[in-house]
Image (cartoon, helix red, strand yellow):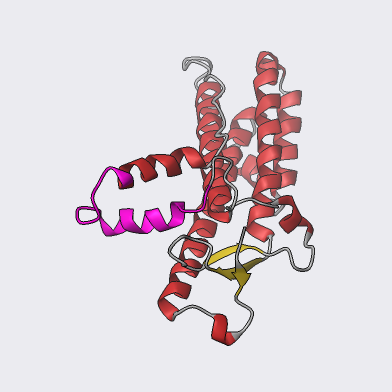
Amino acid sequence: MVNKLASRSSDWPPGEDRRRAFGQYTAAVGKAMHAWGNLHEILGQLFVVVTRAERSIALAIWYSTESCEAQRRMLSAAVKANTKIILRNGDFKWFFDQCNELSQRYYDVTNAPSSLYLGNYNDGNAILAVSYIYGHPRANNLSGRKLLVEFDLCERYCETLALFAAKMERSLASSGDDSWPHRPRPPTSGLKKIKRIHQLCESTSPVSRSPRAAQSMKVLRSVDDKGEIK
């Protein structure tokens, strides 16, 4: 469990620790948001191919709304209306289900309030973690979860779906010349990548460990097999 919240100025860690904690958090937010935006840019290209409309017109329709959910609904409607790809409807349904599941997770992790906590790691470093103080619904959805792990999962989930969407777009654009892609396996935990870093760090001595690896070790501590805060 988190030890205590930095509620008083005297409780706050040194500036370097604060900058490290905020730096890890803001970098994770930025990567997740970039991956989410890139996914929907690729979906826009898929929309052009599925609608078979003039490119400029299709993109004007796609960007007529600022809602990512509305864009995905438009793409889903276009897929259902395109009789030439009816045999692929099962893959598209699976794809949209994955996108909707990811959407919930993405908005939870990027909109949940966070606070600076002290002494969560074995070395006593501060971290930014989900703040449950006022009962924010999105914070409650992340109960017991590690923010950095959740951000990592969202980023890789977006990248996985974006690659699949790009392959579908290429296959449809080539009129079947390219083989239809297989459904990818969505990442089930942000820990797979983290554990690989952990093994790398543990396999090297403190002397030979790079600064980046040493910093990764700090991030890895206190994460159990379920990605929860110890």
| Residue 45 position in % (x across, y down) | 56, 37
Q: Residue at x 52, y 49 (%)?
A: 223
| Residue 58 position in % (x across, y down) | 65, 40
Compared to residue 172, the image places residue 147 above or below, namely below
| Residue 132 position in % (x across, y down) | 73, 63
Q: Residue at x 56, y 41 (%)?
A: 158
Q: Residue at x 70, y 54 (%)?
A: 66
Q: Residue at x 79, y 57 (%)?
A: 137
Compared to residue 139, the image places residue 184 above or below, namely above
- Boundaries of the magenta span: 202-223
* Closer to us: 43 or 142: 142
User: Which quadrant of the rendered structure holds the N terminus?
Assistant: bottom right
211 left or right, relative to 49:
left
**Residue 132 at least partly seen:** yes
Q: Residue furthest left?
A: 208
* Closer to us: 158 or 189: 189
* Closer to us: 229 or 42: 229
**Residue 61 at least partly seen:** no
Compared to residue 173, the image places residue 192 above or below, namely below
When asked about the image quadrant of residue 56, the answer is: top right
Compared to residue 77, the image places residue 10 above or below, namely below
Total residue callouts: 0
Question: Is 35 in the magenta?
Answer: no
When asked about the image quadrant of residue 196, the answer is: top left
When asked about the image quadrant of residue 96, the answer is: top right
28 left or right, relative to 90:
left
* Closer to us: 163 or 103: 103
| Residue 102 position in % (x across, y down) | 65, 41
Q: Residue furthest bottom?
A: 10
1 left or right, relative to 70:
left
